[in-house]
Each structure stands twice: as structure tokens, then as C-alpha cells.
Image (cartoon, rainbow, N blue to C red):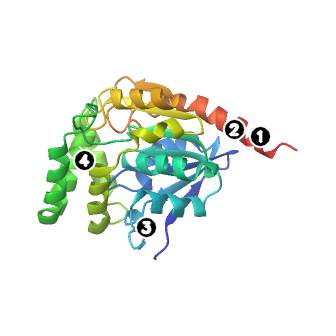
Amino acid sequence: MTDLHIDIVGTGPIPLVVLHGWAMHGGVMSPLVDALKDRCTIHVVDLPGHGYSRNCPLPLEPSTSAAAIAAATPPAMWLGWSMGGLIALTAALEIPQQVLGLAMLCATPKFVRDESWPYGSDATQVRHLATDLETDYHATLERFMALEAMGSPDPRAELRHLRTLVFARGEPDLRVLQEGIRILEDGDCRAALLDLAMPSAWIAGRRDRLVPPMAMQWSAGQCGGSFTEIEHAGHAPFFGHVDALAEALQPLLAQTQERLAQDTAP
């Protein structure tokens, strides 16, 4: 199989594209997909090199990935979790006619911290992940999953869950894991936030140790989006907090449905 794999779930009137994070696959988003499938028709993407798209030859590079996903899906609301948020944000900026609304879930326009950006992850930690991929692939994924689970009310249980899910569709391709690390290291869309043309929702987990909620609050302020912080959630709010997450998405879903009605009105 060489094509991008996209599952279509639900029959609701609102089209929704869902993008997972680094080293994962679309299946990890199933709690959220189940919560929204009555209201939405959901296009659940396995990003290039991940899950059932493991043999997809496309690079993970955000513009390339966004264009390929847009070519395979109708105009829709896009939701990106973690690294998937950078791809969703790129689509919103570069192909705005395809993105009716943008939901950024524990996702940020710039992942690493530097002198100009106090709200990022430690750059040294990200570089270590890149180096360690070469020498101990499985241990590196294990460490990253542990970082994702940090802040959860039950991090051990969440780590077990992630560990079970991550390889459920086969191992991700080492090539795109390395590409993903470079995206996390180098990606910076902060300046472009002022150009966002569609409504957006920025949803954070208060206990997230990878993407500080302040990063998302700042970003929402830049583009006039809404900001919601889920009180007891970590980096993956769809585990254990899916009802709060679905509630936080309702205003953007309503805006998307209204925009669809306007676009189809005679």
C-alpha cells in the first residue's frame, strides 16, 4: 500500500478531518471520534509513514502532508493533536478554502523553547530524541510516550494505554519519525497566526508537560480564537476527558456548520 490511509467514520452533517501526533496513528483518536461521530463525518488520517500509511512515500513535511490530505478530503473543520496540529495549522494558512474551522488540541505554532519563546519544550530534550532514534528506536518511543502521559491523573495507566495503541497498526517508519523530530525542532508559525482566516479553537490540558497551556492561550489571542483549558488533563485529553473535550469543541462545530449552510445557500 502506497497511498495515504484515511478512515471515514460517522454520518453527521459536519465534515471533520482528524490528525494524530508524532509516532502515533489515527486509531489513538478513537475516543474523540466515537464522541463526535453522530454529529460529524470524520476523516481520520494516518499521516505518512504512520499506521496504515506506513508505506506512503510522501514526506511528513507539513505543506506536503496538508496538500495530500486536502486533496483526499472535502472542505472541513480540521483538528490536529500535538504534531498533527502543525500540519492542520499549515493547511489553514496555505489552503484556507479547505479548512472551515481549525481546532488545535495540545498543539502549538512553535514546539521548542528559545529566547523568543518561553512557552515551548526544552530544545535539548527534543535533540536527544532525534539522536536516540538512531541508536534505540523502541526506547525513544517509550520515553516520548512517558512524556505524553506525564500530568495525567493516572500516568501509568495512560502510558500502558499508549503503549498498547502505538503499535496496533504496525511500527511507524523510522524515516518519518526523524522527519517529525525536525518538524518539532524547526517549525515556527507564530508570525502567520495573524493571517488565519477561519475561526479557531485552542484546547489545552492544564497538566500538559509537552505543550504548556500558555503557548495555546497566547496563540488564541494572536488569531482571535477561543482558548479552553481542561483542568485535569495532560497531553492527551481524549483519554479520560473526552466529554470535556467534546464540549470544548461544540462552539467551533456550530460555527463550521453555520459556515457550511452559508456556503450552500442559494
Q: Which residue is mark 3?
A: 53
Q: Which residue is mark 4?
A: 145
Q: Is residue 11 above or below residue 150?
A: below
Residue 152 placement, left or right of 223: left
Q: Secondary structure at mark 4?
A: helix
Q: Position of residue 116 (x, y in %)?
A: 27, 34
Residue 190 versus residue 120: which sits nearer the camera?
A: 190
Q: Secondary structure at mark 1?
A: helix
In three-dimensional space, the C-alpha distance between marks 1 and 2, rounded to whole angstroms, equals 6 Å
In three-dimensional space, the C-alpha distance between marks 3 and 2, rounded to whole angstroms, equals 30 Å
Which numbered disc, 4 or 2, marks the residue that appears first in the sequence? 4
Q: Position of residue 143 (x, y in %)?
A: 18, 49
Task: Please identify the residue farthest to the top as the structure is shown.
Answer: 231
Q: Which residue is mark 1?
A: 261
Q: Amino acid at mark 1?
A: Ala
Residue 23 versus residue 171: which sits nearer the camera?
A: 23
Query: Residue placed at 36% from the left, 45% from the top?
Result: 188
